[in-house]
Image (cartoon, helix red, strand yellow):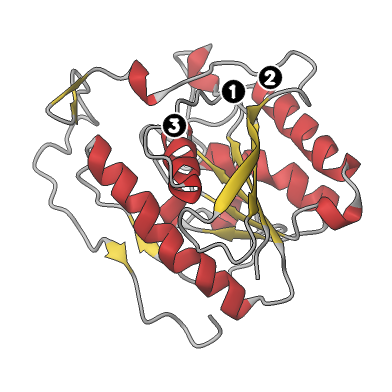
Amino acid sequence: MLDKIYIARHGFRLNWVNNNWVAPTGLARDAPLAAYGETQADQLAKYFLSLPEEDRPTLIASSPYYRCLQTAAPTSRALATPIFVESGLSECLIQYFPDVIDAAAWPESLYLPPRVGEDVAELHQRAKTFLDVFIPTVERAFPEHKRILLVSHAATVIVLTRALLGEPDLPIRVGCCSVTEIVRKPGGAALGGWEAKKLADGAHLPEGASREWGIEDIEVAQGRVVEDPGVPGTENEEDGPNGVQIPLSSNL
C-alpha cells in the first residue's frame, strides 16, 4: 500500500525566456525546459538522492509533456527508478527518453483528459477520478512499492494535492520543481485520507521556488478561462476518447 506521495511541478520552461523555441516533439505548447529548468531538475534529483533510502520514491509517474519528462529523468536516473507515463497527469513521448520510461510495465494511461479542455470544476473532478483509479491500480500492480513521485503541471499539482487532502479550497501556490510531500493517515482512503508534510516547498533549490502559480492567477468567468485563444487551427477539432480507460492490459 502506498504510504507517501511526492508531487513535483516541472522545471522552468524555455518559452518563458525565448520566443523562438522549437518543441522537440513538434507539438504546439510542448515547450522544453530552459537551461535553468534543467538545473532545477538536477537539483530535484539531488534532493531525492539525499533522503534516507526508506524515504525515497521507488516509482515515478509523469505527465507525457516533454518538460515533465525532462524534469523526471534526472531523478529516475539517480534513483534507478523507471518512469511511467500517465496522461491523467497532463495539463507518448517514449522515443525521447528510452532509457528511463518503462512502457512495458505501464503500457497505457489510466485516464485521458479531454482534448477540448476543462473548466476549473472539471479539473478538480478529473483529479479525484484519476486518483481514485490510479492509487488502487498502483497498489495492486506494484504492492511492494510504498512511495511514489508524480511529476506534473502547476494546476494539476494543485488539484491533486487538494483531492488527496480532501481540501478543495486549499490555498496553494506552486513553483517550478517545488515538492509537495503527502503521507497517508492510518487507514486513510485514496481521497481525503492523507496529510501534508510539505506544500510546494522549494527549500531544496538554491535559488528557491520560481514562477509560483495558483489557480487564482487565471481569469475565470462561469468556471471558464477567459482570453485563452488556444492553439490556432484546432477550433473545430472534435474531442477524442477521454476519462477512465479500463479495462487495462493484463499486467496492470
Note whether residue 5 is visible: yes
The residue where tag 1 is placed is 12
The x, y position of residue 201, in whole percent, is: 67, 27
- Residue drawn at x 49%, y 26% is 172
Q: Residue furthest bottom?
A: 250
Q: Mark 1 or mark 2, which is nearer the start of the sequence?
A: 1
Give amino acid for label 3. Leu
Residue 3 in the image, given as x and y percentages of width and height: 68, 60
Task: State the residue position of label 3.
Answer: 170
Amino acid of disc 2: Tyr
Label 1 neighbourhood size at 10 Å, few (<14), some (14-19), many (20+)? many
Residue positioned 60% across, 25% down in the render: 176
What label sits on residue 36 in the rendered view? 2
Question: Can residue 104 be seen by looking at this rendering?
Answer: no
Quick one: which residue is furthest to the left in this view? Answer: 236
10 Å neighbourhood of mark 2: few (<14), some, or many (≥20)? Answer: few
Place of residue 157 in the rendered image (x, y in percent of width and height, measured from the top left): 49, 39
Q: Is residue 233 above or below residue 77?
A: above
Residue type at the position of mark 1: Phe
Q: In the image, which is nearer the foreground, mark 3 or mark 2?
A: 3
Q: Residue at x 43, y 55 (%)?
A: 87
User: How far apart are labels 3 and 2 at the CA level?
Assistant: 29 Å
How far apart are the two marked residues, 2 and 1, measured between alpha carbons?
6 Å
Q: Nearer the viewer, residue 4 or 98?
A: 4
Is 43 rendered above or below residue 56? Answer: above
